[in-house]
Amino acid sequence: MAALFVDERDHDLPGVLIPRPEVHLVVRFGPSARRGLDAHAFGGRQRVHRKLIRSGQRTVTARLHLGSHEAVLGVPVSEIAGGPVALGELWGDAATQRLFDRLGDTRDTADAAAILESAIAERLALADGRRSPAQLALVAAARLTSAHVNAVAVDIGVSERHLRRVFRETIGVSPKAFARLARFHHALRAATEDEHAPWASIAAEAGYYDQAHLISEFRAFTGMTPQGFLGELRAAPLLG
Protein backbone atom coordinates (compact mmCIF):
# COMPACT_ATOMS: atom_id res chain seq x y z
CA MET A 1 0.00 0.00 0.00
CA ALA A 2 1.03 3.58 -0.59
CA ALA A 3 -0.82 4.82 2.50
CA LEU A 4 -3.36 3.78 5.14
CA PHE A 5 -5.80 6.17 6.84
CA VAL A 6 -8.24 5.83 9.73
CA ASP A 7 -11.04 8.25 10.55
CA GLU A 8 -13.54 8.36 13.44
CA ARG A 9 -16.35 10.90 13.79
CA ASP A 10 -18.23 11.93 16.91
CA HIS A 11 -20.12 14.67 15.03
CA ASP A 12 -21.06 15.49 11.43
CA LEU A 13 -18.11 17.01 9.57
CA PRO A 14 -17.26 17.60 5.89
CA GLY A 15 -14.31 15.72 4.42
CA VAL A 16 -12.20 16.14 1.30
CA LEU A 17 -10.74 13.62 -1.12
CA ILE A 18 -7.90 15.13 -3.14
CA PRO A 19 -7.72 14.02 -6.79
CA ARG A 20 -5.23 11.18 -7.22
CA PRO A 21 -4.52 8.52 -9.86
CA GLU A 22 -4.25 5.72 -7.29
CA VAL A 23 -7.03 3.25 -6.51
CA HIS A 24 -8.49 3.38 -2.97
CA LEU A 25 -10.10 0.62 -0.93
CA VAL A 26 -12.49 1.97 1.72
CA VAL A 27 -14.06 0.09 4.65
CA ARG A 28 -16.86 1.85 6.57
CA PHE A 29 -18.37 1.06 9.95
CA GLY A 30 -21.46 2.81 11.26
CA PRO A 31 -24.91 4.08 10.27
CA SER A 32 -23.90 5.14 6.74
CA ALA A 33 -22.76 1.60 5.85
CA ARG A 34 -25.16 -1.12 4.77
CA ARG A 35 -25.75 -3.41 7.76
CA GLY A 36 -23.19 -1.37 9.67
CA LEU A 37 -20.17 -2.54 7.61
CA ASP A 38 -19.30 -2.25 3.93
CA ALA A 39 -16.28 -1.95 1.63
CA HIS A 40 -15.82 -0.35 -1.78
CA ALA A 41 -13.06 0.30 -4.30
CA PHE A 42 -12.67 3.71 -5.90
CA GLY A 43 -10.72 4.36 -9.08
CA GLY A 44 -8.51 7.38 -9.56
CA ARG A 45 -10.06 10.83 -9.36
CA GLN A 46 -9.24 13.96 -11.35
CA ARG A 47 -11.36 16.36 -9.30
CA VAL A 48 -11.77 17.02 -5.60
CA HIS A 49 -14.56 15.01 -4.00
CA ARG A 50 -16.36 16.53 -1.01
CA LYS A 51 -18.55 14.55 1.35
CA LEU A 52 -20.33 15.08 4.66
CA ILE A 53 -19.22 12.32 7.04
CA ARG A 54 -21.89 11.47 9.58
CA SER A 55 -21.42 11.14 13.31
CA GLY A 56 -20.64 7.61 14.43
CA GLN A 57 -18.92 6.56 11.23
CA ARG A 58 -15.50 4.92 11.34
CA THR A 59 -13.51 4.53 8.14
CA VAL A 60 -10.33 2.74 7.08
CA THR A 61 -8.92 3.76 3.70
CA ALA A 62 -6.06 2.03 1.89
CA ARG A 63 -4.41 3.82 -1.02
CA LEU A 64 -2.89 1.20 -3.32
CA HIS A 65 0.43 1.60 -5.07
CA LEU A 66 0.24 2.45 -8.74
CA GLY A 67 0.10 -0.72 -10.80
CA SER A 68 -0.97 -2.97 -7.91
CA HIS A 69 -4.74 -2.62 -8.36
CA GLU A 70 -5.24 -5.69 -10.53
CA ALA A 71 -3.27 -7.93 -8.16
CA VAL A 72 -5.27 -6.68 -5.16
CA LEU A 73 -8.73 -6.32 -6.72
CA GLY A 74 -8.55 -8.84 -9.57
CA VAL A 75 -9.81 -6.56 -12.36
CA PRO A 76 -8.31 -4.02 -14.80
CA VAL A 77 -8.34 -0.46 -13.57
CA SER A 78 -10.84 0.49 -16.30
CA GLU A 79 -13.52 -1.53 -14.48
CA ILE A 80 -13.35 0.64 -11.38
CA ALA A 81 -12.85 4.04 -12.98
CA GLY A 82 -14.31 6.59 -10.60
CA GLY A 83 -16.17 4.04 -8.50
CA PRO A 84 -17.51 3.13 -6.08
CA VAL A 85 -17.56 -0.61 -6.75
CA ALA A 86 -18.63 -2.93 -3.93
CA LEU A 87 -15.79 -5.18 -2.82
CA GLY A 88 -17.98 -8.27 -3.21
CA GLU A 89 -18.20 -7.61 -6.96
CA LEU A 90 -14.40 -7.76 -7.16
CA TRP A 91 -13.35 -10.39 -4.59
CA GLY A 92 -16.49 -12.49 -4.68
CA ASP A 93 -18.90 -13.13 -1.82
CA ALA A 94 -16.81 -15.74 0.02
CA ALA A 95 -13.57 -13.75 0.21
CA THR A 96 -15.42 -10.56 1.09
CA GLN A 97 -17.38 -12.28 3.86
CA ARG A 98 -14.15 -13.66 5.35
CA LEU A 99 -12.83 -10.11 5.56
CA PHE A 100 -16.09 -8.84 7.06
CA ASP A 101 -16.07 -11.63 9.64
CA ARG A 102 -12.60 -10.57 10.77
CA LEU A 103 -13.53 -6.88 10.78
CA GLY A 104 -16.77 -7.55 12.63
CA ASP A 105 -14.86 -8.97 15.58
CA THR A 106 -13.16 -5.65 16.36
CA ARG A 107 -14.44 -2.28 17.51
CA ASP A 108 -10.99 -0.71 17.40
CA THR A 109 -10.27 1.24 14.20
CA ALA A 110 -6.52 0.67 14.45
CA ASP A 111 -7.12 -3.09 14.63
CA ALA A 112 -9.45 -2.83 11.62
CA ALA A 113 -6.69 -1.06 9.69
CA ALA A 114 -4.27 -3.88 10.50
CA ILE A 115 -6.82 -6.46 9.33
CA LEU A 116 -7.36 -4.64 6.02
CA GLU A 117 -3.62 -4.27 5.51
CA SER A 118 -3.16 -8.00 6.13
CA ALA A 119 -5.93 -8.89 3.66
CA ILE A 120 -4.34 -6.74 0.96
CA ALA A 121 -0.94 -8.33 1.61
CA GLU A 122 -2.51 -11.78 1.23
CA ARG A 123 -4.00 -10.80 -2.13
CA LEU A 124 -0.64 -9.52 -3.32
CA ALA A 125 1.11 -12.71 -2.19
CA LEU A 126 -1.40 -14.87 -4.07
CA ALA A 127 -0.93 -12.79 -7.22
CA ASP A 128 2.88 -12.84 -7.06
CA GLY A 129 4.28 -14.61 -10.09
CA ARG A 130 0.96 -14.65 -11.93
CA ARG A 131 0.51 -10.93 -12.53
CA SER A 132 3.09 -8.21 -12.89
CA PRO A 133 2.48 -4.51 -13.35
CA ALA A 134 3.50 -2.88 -16.63
CA GLN A 135 6.96 -1.72 -15.61
CA LEU A 136 7.17 0.63 -18.57
CA ALA A 137 4.21 2.64 -17.28
CA LEU A 138 5.58 2.74 -13.75
CA VAL A 139 8.98 3.94 -14.99
CA ALA A 140 7.22 6.59 -17.04
CA ALA A 141 5.11 7.64 -14.04
CA ALA A 142 8.23 8.32 -11.99
CA ARG A 143 9.67 10.50 -14.77
CA LEU A 144 6.46 12.37 -15.54
CA THR A 145 6.75 14.20 -12.24
CA SER A 146 9.47 16.38 -13.81
CA ALA A 147 9.25 15.95 -17.61
CA HIS A 148 6.75 16.25 -20.44
CA VAL A 149 5.04 13.22 -21.96
CA ASN A 150 6.83 13.34 -25.33
CA ALA A 151 10.23 13.67 -23.64
CA VAL A 152 9.51 10.70 -21.38
CA ALA A 153 8.40 8.55 -24.33
CA VAL A 154 11.62 9.35 -26.22
CA ASP A 155 13.71 8.77 -23.13
CA ILE A 156 12.35 5.26 -22.52
CA GLY A 157 12.37 4.34 -26.20
CA VAL A 158 8.68 4.02 -27.10
CA SER A 159 6.21 6.00 -29.16
CA GLU A 160 3.99 8.47 -27.37
CA ARG A 161 0.94 6.54 -28.63
CA HIS A 162 2.24 3.27 -27.14
CA LEU A 163 3.00 4.99 -23.85
CA ARG A 164 -0.52 6.41 -23.67
CA ARG A 165 -2.08 2.99 -24.29
CA VAL A 166 0.03 1.13 -21.71
CA PHE A 167 -0.34 3.95 -19.22
CA ARG A 168 -4.13 3.93 -19.39
CA GLU A 169 -4.22 0.15 -19.00
CA THR A 170 -1.91 0.16 -15.97
CA ILE A 171 -2.49 3.48 -14.22
CA GLY A 172 -6.03 4.31 -15.33
CA VAL A 173 -5.41 7.84 -16.61
CA SER A 174 -3.49 9.27 -19.55
CA PRO A 175 0.18 10.27 -19.10
CA LYS A 176 -0.82 13.92 -19.54
CA ALA A 177 -3.47 13.69 -16.82
CA PHE A 178 -0.99 11.95 -14.52
CA ALA A 179 1.59 14.71 -15.11
CA ARG A 180 -1.03 17.36 -14.28
CA LEU A 181 -1.89 15.56 -11.04
CA ALA A 182 1.80 15.26 -10.17
CA ARG A 183 2.31 19.02 -10.59
CA PHE A 184 -0.81 19.73 -8.55
CA HIS A 185 0.39 17.55 -5.66
CA HIS A 186 3.87 19.06 -5.83
CA ALA A 187 2.44 22.56 -5.54
CA LEU A 188 -0.05 21.62 -2.81
CA ARG A 189 2.66 19.94 -0.75
CA ALA A 190 4.96 22.97 -1.08
CA ALA A 191 2.18 25.39 -0.09
CA THR A 192 1.18 23.24 2.88
CA GLU A 193 4.75 22.96 4.17
CA ASP A 194 5.38 26.72 3.89
CA GLU A 195 2.25 28.86 4.11
CA HIS A 196 4.30 32.01 3.39
CA ALA A 197 5.93 30.76 0.19
CA PRO A 198 5.07 32.97 -2.81
CA TRP A 199 2.76 31.28 -5.28
CA ALA A 200 4.98 32.38 -8.16
CA SER A 201 7.90 30.47 -6.62
CA ILE A 202 5.74 27.41 -5.97
CA ALA A 203 4.52 27.50 -9.57
CA ALA A 204 8.06 27.56 -10.95
CA GLU A 205 9.25 24.79 -8.62
CA ALA A 206 6.28 22.54 -9.48
CA GLY A 207 6.75 22.91 -13.24
CA TYR A 208 3.95 25.33 -14.15
CA TYR A 209 4.47 27.96 -16.85
CA ASP A 210 3.64 30.72 -14.39
CA GLN A 211 1.41 31.58 -11.43
CA ALA A 212 -1.63 32.03 -13.68
CA HIS A 213 -1.17 28.48 -14.98
CA LEU A 214 -1.05 27.15 -11.40
CA ILE A 215 -4.23 29.03 -10.45
CA SER A 216 -6.01 27.71 -13.55
CA GLU A 217 -5.04 24.12 -12.72
CA PHE A 218 -6.15 24.47 -9.09
CA ARG A 219 -9.52 25.73 -10.27
CA ALA A 220 -9.83 22.78 -12.66
CA PHE A 221 -9.06 20.23 -9.92
CA THR A 222 -10.74 21.87 -6.92
CA GLY A 223 -13.14 24.52 -8.20
CA MET A 224 -11.32 27.05 -6.00
CA THR A 225 -8.28 29.31 -5.94
CA PRO A 226 -5.13 27.79 -4.37
CA GLN A 227 -5.51 29.97 -1.26
CA GLY A 228 -9.18 29.11 -0.94
CA PHE A 229 -8.48 25.40 -1.20
CA LEU A 230 -5.79 25.57 1.49
CA GLY A 231 -8.36 27.19 3.75
CA GLU A 232 -10.80 24.38 3.05
CA LEU A 233 -8.19 21.75 3.90
CA ARG A 234 -7.53 23.42 7.25
CA ALA A 235 -11.24 23.11 8.10
CA ALA A 236 -12.13 19.75 6.49
CA PRO A 237 -9.97 16.69 7.15
CA LEU A 238 -8.57 14.63 4.31
CA LEU A 239 -10.28 11.31 3.67
CA GLY A 240 -7.42 9.66 1.76
Image (cartoon, rainbow, N blue to C red):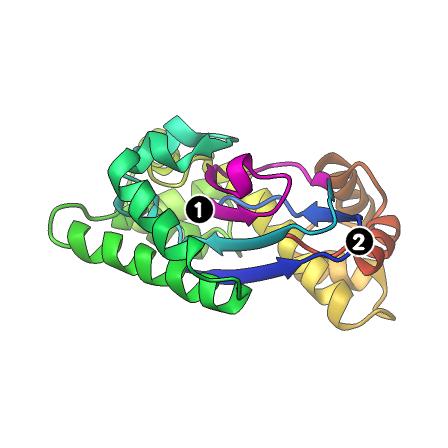
The x, y position of residue 26, in whole percent, is 50, 47
Is residue 214 in sight in this rendering? Answer: yes
Left or right: residue 151 compared with residue 218: left
Front residue of 200 and 18: 18
Element on which disc 1 rests? helix
Please state the extent of the stretch shown in magenta in the rendering.
24-51
- Any mark on residue 160, and which? none
Front residue of 9 and 177: 9
Asked if residue 190 is positioned above or below residue 30 in the image, the reply reads below
Q: Is residue 41 magenta?
A: yes
Q: Are marks 1 and 2 in contact (CB under 8 Å)?
A: no
- Any mark on residue 151, and which? 1
Residue 185 placement: quadrant: bottom right
Q: Quadrant of the N terminus?
A: bottom left
**Which amino acid does the dot numbered 2 rest on?**
His
* Residue drawn at 33 percent across, 42 percent down: 96
- Any mark on residue 11, and which? 2
Residue 114 placement: quadrant: bottom left
* Residue drawn at 65 percent across, 47 percent down: 18
Dot 1 alpha-carbon crowd within 10 angstroms: few under 14, some 14 to 19, many 20 or more: few
* Residue drawn at 17 percent across, 45 percent down: 131
Residue 45 placement: quadrant: top right
Q: Which is more N-terminal, label 2 or label 1?
A: 2
Asked if residue 203 is positioned above or below residue 213 in the image, the reply reads below
Q: Is residue 171 magenta?
A: no
